[in-house]
Amino acid sequence: SSTTSTEKEEAEEEEAEEEETEEKEAVAEAEEEEVDPMKIIAQAIQHKEEGNEFFKTGDLTKASRSYRKGTSILQKHIPNSSQEEQIKALLISLQTNLSMVSYKLDKFQQSRDVANKVLELDSSNIKALYRRALANKQMKNLSNARQDLKAALQLDPKNKAVQKELVLIKKEIEKQNSKEKLKYSKIFESSDSSFLYDDKEEEQKKKMLEKEKEEVEKQKLKEKRKQDWEDACVDRMSRGEEAITFEDYEKEIKKKEEAEEKEKQEQARKKAKIDQEQRDLQRRLAKQNLKESDGDDDSDGEELTERELQMLRGYKKTSDGRTTSYFTREQTEEEKKLLGSIAPKKLDTTSSTLSSNIPNALSAGGVSAGSGDATHTAPQRLDSSISASSAWNQAGTWEEKDTSEWCNTTLKTFLNDSSASHTSSSTSTSSFYAKIKNVKDLNGDASVAFVSGKKRYVFDYNANIVYKIYLKNVSDENQGDDKDDDDVVIGEGTLFLPDISSTAINDELEIEIKGWKKVPDAMYRDDAINCRENLVGNVRQQVIAFVTTFNAQY
């Protein structure tokens, strides 16, 4: 095994030397020519795309080298470049990819170090925090990994991958603590401990060990309380509340425990009181029944007689002759009069109260259907302020109308009408625009509910939107319409809207940007991304417009 380990270390050293040589060659190649930021960016993008291709084919080693070359070229030219922000964004992308590939190659320390460099450029980069946490986890730095995941979750509370990994980290920490606890417990295990009491020195040693164990347990308990406090602070901040100090947290927990204990004692006292009252009531009922039924001598003792116990376990006859449980209570005549008849009754649909609230159909001239005028046009839409619900629901408790068919058609129309444009910042002669190709997989339903006299608009949809991005033909700029046939399609992709619902519409609508179906060329890629961002904003506006139209329609 030692021979295998040595060979592995030698192979890694050779590989590191090769990578360093290739990085130097890439930097030297870039320095031979006159430094042009755009050329440097183009070279780095080329290395990134090569790395992506190697990654797709599963050649992680070559992917790592390509990402390193691109990173080395950019790092050389950041300080004195006019394109600093663009180079910085590209460098972050290359280094996050390199961190991921290093992790997959089991180079966990390298993955962590590269993620550190990303965080030096952008301290709130969620991907870098996540990559560093995974690397720290493999290196058994569980506390650091947990800290990075919490920071990432504060930046993106809905990130499923971060949430899942944080749960796994917590379980790993608990497992590690259990192992340590077991290790300390074994210190005190012995097949024969009687010898400890034969010698005073051994007895003192045992006391010291026990004291040490007690201190360790106290420290563990305190660490656990601190972890719980950190979790509580994260939870508070995710709800927009301020974090509290550890001392205030301990006071809060102590008050809560005291209140729970007090509540538990109060519940136990009430239960004991109720049980005692029930036993007393049963005893009195049994004795009273004995007197009324057969005039047996009643004992005033605290214990029930055998006859009383038999009656408690038996049955009795009601006033109408039915046999039932002894404790079944019959209503008195006075109670029956107060309650009245509770049998279900059929609604009288011809009553004056009901008919007076049913609106008549209107003709074109405003004459009701019952006026005798034989000429009528199609029924007019009633004003929602006149009748919030149908005639049978006079109490206005709950009524729901299905509007799915109208909403499906209208929402699809609004989404199809989404569009956006963008003018290149690098050259004013290039302009781009985005249009929706089609809306597919529009799923969901909608309704209007009348609850306690108020309207509620309820809808829940999700959809995939296919879009295209065009490079506008210069000869078409003075014409009224876009000439899609003459303009060049430079990119195509899909937007996924997972939650178009009445509960989420007040927040910013969630839109997931899927991968490119047609990838834009490198020279147009930034403009295509900007145009796509404008399209995302317009899609959100179209959904808001749909909601406004929905509210006006019903």
Image (cartoon, helix red, strand yellow):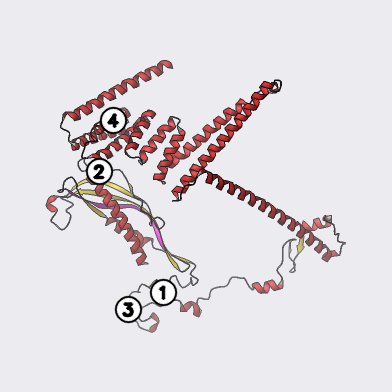
Please tell me the numbered disc located at residue 68: 4
Residue lying furthest left: 475
Q: Position of residue 232 (x, y in %)?
A: 50, 45
Left/right placement of residue 488 relative to residue 454 reads left
- Secondary structure type for disc 3: loop
Q: Are the residues tagged 2 and 1 within 8 Å (C-beta)?
A: no
Secondary structure category for the residue under label 2: loop
Q: Earlier in the sequence, mark 2 or mark 1?
A: 1
Mark-to-mark CA distance, 1 and 3: 19 Å
For residue 443: magenta? yes
Residue 518's disc number:
2
Residue annotated with mark 3: 364
Estimate how packed mark 4 is, as few (under 14), some (14 to 19) or many (20 or more) residues with alpha carbons within 10 Å. Answer: many
In reply to whether residue 501 is colored magenta, the answer given is no
| Residue 491 in view, yes or no | no
469 lies above or below 403: above
Q: Which residues are magenta?
A: 427-447
